[in-house]
Image: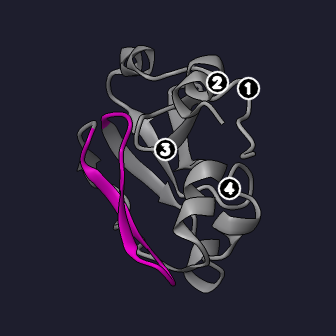
Amino acid sequence: MSEIRDGLNYTKTDEWVKVTDNIAVIGITDYAQTHLGDIVFVELKEEGVELKKGDVLTTIESVKSASDIYSPVSGKLIEMNKALETNPGLINKEPYDGGWIAKIEMKNPEEINDLMDSEKYREYRKE
């Protein structure tokens, strides 16, 4: 069974979001990393770009496939997790901690209300 943390918001495409003071930290869920398999590459986008909710935030390559990761919120990309350049497997080891992917300064904080809380995500994934 995959870990689903309380206090985060989730998307149907298995991204998680943690919001602190209008900054959204984004990663992929334990469920997603398990299904991707060993992650071997994470594309790091240029910081400062404006993203709309639903835009491709990054592409992750695993031994099985390449998958697009979508931005769950709109705003400015202010930081990518540089550690993933040399150690993309961090996402497999710690999807909710060291394996975070990006930080976005949110343009429309109310977009968080469109996401699932941990309870709804558990229900959605029914593991």
Name which residue lies at 38% across and 18% down. Answer: 114
Give the SS element for disc 4: loop
Give the SS element for disc 3: loop
The picture places residue 39, in percent across and down from the top left corner, at 57, 76
The residue that label 3 is drawn on is 14
Looking at the rendered structure, the kind of residue marked 4 is Pro
The residue that label 1 is drawn on is 6
Q: Going from the N terminus, do you reach mark 2 or mark 3 first?
A: 3
The relative height of residue 54 versus residue 8 in the rendered view (above or below) is below
Q: Quadrant of residue 101?
A: bottom right
- Dot label at residue 101: none
Whole-number angstrom distance, CA of label 2 to CA of label 3: 12 Å
Q: Classify 10 Å Cα crowding around label 2: few (below 14), some (14-19), many (20 and above).
A: some
Q: Going from the N terminus, do you reach mark 4 or mark 2 first?
A: 4
The residue that label 2 is drawn on is 118
The relative height of residue 48 versus residue 17 in the rendered view (above or below) is below
Compared across the picture, whether 67 is left or right of 38 comes to left
Looking at the rendered structure, the kind of residue marked 3 is Asp
Whole-number angstrom distance, CA of label 1 to CA of label 2: 5 Å
The residue positioned farthest toward the front in the image shown: 127
The picture places residue 53, in percent across and down from the top left corner, at 28, 36
The relative height of residue 87 versus residue 103 in the rendered view (above or below) is below
Name which residue lies at 57% across and 27% down. Answer: 121
The picture places residue 63, in percent across and down from the top left corner, at 51, 84
- Dot label at residue 95: 4
The picture places residue 80, in percent across and down from the top left corner, at 50, 62
Contact between marks 1 and 2 (CB within 8 A): the answer is yes
Query: What span is in magenta?
Result: 54-74
Quarter of the figure that contains the N terminus: top right
Foreground pick, 90 / 127? 127
Magenta-span inclusion, residue 25: no
Compared across the picture, whether 83 is left or right of 101 comes to right
